[in-house]
Amino acid sequence: MAELSIDPISSKADRAAFVDVAYRLNADDPNWVGNLRMEEIAKFTPGKNPYFDHARCQLFLARRGQEIVGRIAAHIDELALGQPPEQGMGPGTGMWGAIEAVDADVAAALIATAEDWLRAHDMHRAMAPMNLSVWEEPGLQVVGFDHAPMYMMAHHNAAYRPWIEGAGYERVKTLHTYEIDVRIPYPPLIQRIIASGEKNAKIRVREVVLKNFAAEAAIICDILNDAWSDNWGFVPFTDDEIEHIGKALKPIVHPELIRIAEYEGEPVAFMMTLPDMNGVLSKVTGRTGKPSPLGWLRLLKWLKRPRPADMRVPLMGVKKRLQSSRLASQLAFMMIEYIRRSSIEKFAAERAEIGWILEDNQGMVAIAEAINSKINREYAIYAKPL
C-alpha cells in the first residue's frame, strides 16, 4: 500500500479537488445529497465567503500515492474567540470540520494534522466537526441515517463517530432536528393562543417584502443576533455575512414563508422557512453537484414554483427581553401557524423539519413538542483539549 501523505492546499485546482472528495466518497449513500458544486467551492474560497473575513483556515488533502483519500479543514474564528467560554467557544478554541476519509487510518491522520495546525496557532482546545461556521453545518450526524437531510443540513457516514471518539473527543453538545406533518392542525390549546393573539391590536405578523429584501434581512439578523446572543455556540453575524446570506437565499425565498412579528410597531420576532431544495437537488445533480443543461432547467423551474415542496425551518428568534414572557410563545405559535397554512395552500407541503435546536434550549424544545413534532435527526459536537 502506498504511503499516506497529508498536505496543506491553497491552489484553485486543489480547492476543487477538496470539494470533489465529498461527492466521490458519498456516491454510494442513497441518502447523501450534495450541494451545488459551485456553491461548495465558493464556501471554501476566501473572498467569496465572508466567514474568511474573521477566520483563519487551512484546507488539507490526504493522498495515498496519487489517489486522494480524504480531506479536512482546520480553522480559527476570531469572533468565536471573543465569546464567553461558558457559551462553548471563547479564547483558545479552534475548530476543524469538513472531514471525509476512506478509512479509520486516514481519519486519524487528518484529525492529528488539524490538531497540529491549531496548536501551531496557539489554540489549546479543538471543537469539531464544524463546517465551517456554527451557522452552516455544525456537528456530526449520529441519528437519522435512514433518510435524506433537508437543505443546509449535513448527512455523514456512520463510521465517522467511532473514528472521532477514538481520537479522544467527547461530546459537549447535542443538536436535534424535529419533523412534523404540517397537514395536521395544531392542538386546540395552541389554536386558542393563536386566536387570542389575533385579537391583540398591538401584534402584527407580516410577510417579508421581497422588493426590500436587503432591509428585511437586516431586520431578521438584528433580531437573531439579539435573540441568540446567550445561546451556546453563538457567534454574531457580520454585516457582510448578512448581505451574503441574503443574496444566497433570495432564489428560494417566498414571502409567505418568512414572517416578522411586530409588537407595538417594533420588529421583535421572526421565523424563516425555506422550501426543501434537497428534494430537487438529489434528482438534478446526480452525485457530482453539477446539473446537466436539462437539470439546470428543471432546477430553475422548481425555484420559480416549488410545488410540491416540503419545508425546513432553519431559524427562528424572539428578542431577548421578551423570551421569558407569554408573548414570546404566542408570537412563535402565530408565525408557525401562518406559515403552516401557506406551505399547504401554495406549496402543497406535507412535511416540515425544524432545526437545528439545542437539546437544552428549553423554550424551543417546548414549542417543538407543543405542536407534536418529533426528533428525527441528531448531531453531536465534540471537543478535546490540545
Image: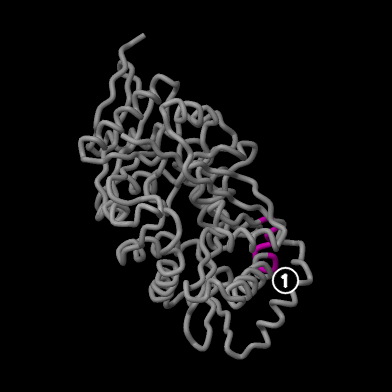
Residue 27 falls inside the magenta stretch: no
What secondary structure is marked by label 1? helix
Q: Amino acid at mark 1?
A: Ile
Q: Which residue is mark 1?
A: 190
Task: Look at the picture and state if 205 lies above or below 348.
Answer: below
Residue 92 or 309: which is nearer the viewer?
92
Quarter of image, res 50: bottom left
Please report the bounds of the magenta region as a residue range.
Answer: 344-351
User: Is 187 displayed left or right of 269 in the figure?
Assistant: right
Quarter of image, res 245: bottom left
Residue 70 or 381: which is nearer the viewer?
381
Q: Residue lying at the far right in this picture: please name it.
A: 188
User: Is 313 displayed left or right of 189 in the figure?
Assistant: left
Residue 94 or 18: which is nearer the viewer?
94
Task: Look at the picture and state if 108 lies above or below 279.
Answer: above
Q: Residue placed at 39% from the left, 72% from the top? A: 218
Q: Residue placed at 62% from the left, 40% from the top? A: 144
**Can residue 287 be seen by looking at this rendering?**
yes
Q: Residue placed at 65% from the left, 49% from the top? A: 375
Percent coordinates x, y for residue 339 in the rendering = 63, 69
Q: Residue placed at 68% from the left, 88% from the top? A: 199
**Can residue 292 be seen by looking at this rendering?**
no
Image quadrant for the N terminus? top left
Image quadrant for the C terminus? top left
Percent coordinates x, y for residue 86 in the rendering = 39, 53
Percent coordinates x, y for residue 167 in the rendering = 41, 27
